[in-house]
């Protein structure tokens, strides 16, 4: 049976987490999870997202895409997390194993912004650019074809920055 957006993501067990991240990251991730270092867990369909407080001042951003048979892909913003096999990913996955209800489903960005008026969207974009000036490069290359078309499709045509 194919997954649908409304279907619940699969449950995992600890053995699947250890198989994904390896024994060392699993042990450290278990300690992180037990220490309560997983913050703001949520899910977008079959994708888990959370923050995990590591040694750095700012928490790391973790994303895990689940598949029908376990973890399909994962990533973390920590130096070791590019392939998603670090202790932070382990902590988030173990949090999912222990408390799946702690990951409330949240609507997509498009769904959340659909009802916003133009002025509110402009204020949001300005605030985002103030926070991360590199985002202004996306505005420079983004060329919407018309208001009737899907804005995401014109992003696909934009040159890489």
Image (tube, rainbow, N blue to C red):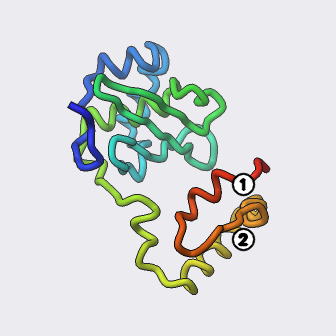
Query: Circle 2 — which element?
Result: helix
Question: Depth-wise, is mark 2 or mark 1 nearer the camera?
Answer: 1
Spatial CA distance of label 2 from label 1 is 22 Å
Which percent across, then down, holds residue 125?
63, 72
Residue beneath the point at 44% across and 46% down: 50
Q: Which of 38 and 73 is in front in this view?
A: 73
Q: Which of 10 and 86 is in front in this view?
A: 10
Residue beneath the point at 46% across and 80% down: 116
Looking at the image, how many numbered discs can be counted on the residues? 2
Label 1 Cα neighbours within 10 Å, binned few <14 / some 14-19 / many ≥20: some
Asked where in the image residue 69 lies, by quadrant, the reply is top left
Query: Circle 1 — which element?
Result: loop
Which percent across, then down, holds residue 60?
56, 43
Which percent across, then down, holds residue 115?
41, 78
Q: Sequence-wise, which precedes: disc 2 or disc 1?
A: 2
Residue beneath the point at 56% across and 58% down: 152
Asked where in the image residue 130 lies, by quadrant, the reply is bottom right
> Quadrant of the image for the N terminus?
top left
Q: Nearer the viewer, residue 152 or 102?
A: 152
Vertical relation: 30 (above or below) 121: above
Q: Do the residues under discs 2 and 1 have CB atoms within 8 angstroms?
A: no
Asked where in the image residue 47 lies, by quadrant, the reply is top left
Which disc is residue 115 wearing? Answer: none
Vertical relation: 85 (above or below) 48: above
Q: Mark 1 points at which residue?
A: 158
Which percent across, then down, holds residue 10?
25, 33
Determine whether, in the image, residue 154 is placed left or right of residue 137.
left
Residue beneath the point at 54% across and 67% down: 149
Label 2 Cα neighbours within 10 Å, binned few <14 / some 14-19 / many ≥20: few
Q: Mark 2 points at which residue?
A: 130
């Amino acid at each position: 049976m194919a997954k649908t957006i409304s279907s619940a993501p699969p449950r995992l067990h600890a053995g699947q987490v250890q198989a994904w991240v390896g024994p060392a990251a699993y042990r450290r991730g278990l300690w992180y999870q037990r220490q309560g270092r997983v913050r703001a867990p949520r899910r977008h369909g079959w994708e888990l997202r959370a923050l995990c407080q590591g040694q750095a001042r700012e928490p790391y951003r973790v994303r895990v895409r689940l598949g029908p048979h376990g973890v399909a892909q994962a990533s973390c913003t920590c130096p070791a997390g590019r392939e998603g096999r670090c202790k932070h990913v382990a902590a988030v996955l173990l949090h999912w194993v222990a408390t799946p209800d702690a990951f409330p489903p949240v609507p997509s960005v498009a769904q959340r912004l659909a009802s916003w008026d133009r002025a509110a969207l402009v204020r949001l974009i300005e605030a985002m650019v103030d926070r991360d000036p590199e985002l202004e490069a996306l505005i420079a290359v983004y060329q919407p074809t018309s208001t009737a078309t899907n804005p995401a499709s014109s992003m696909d045509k934009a040159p890489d920055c």
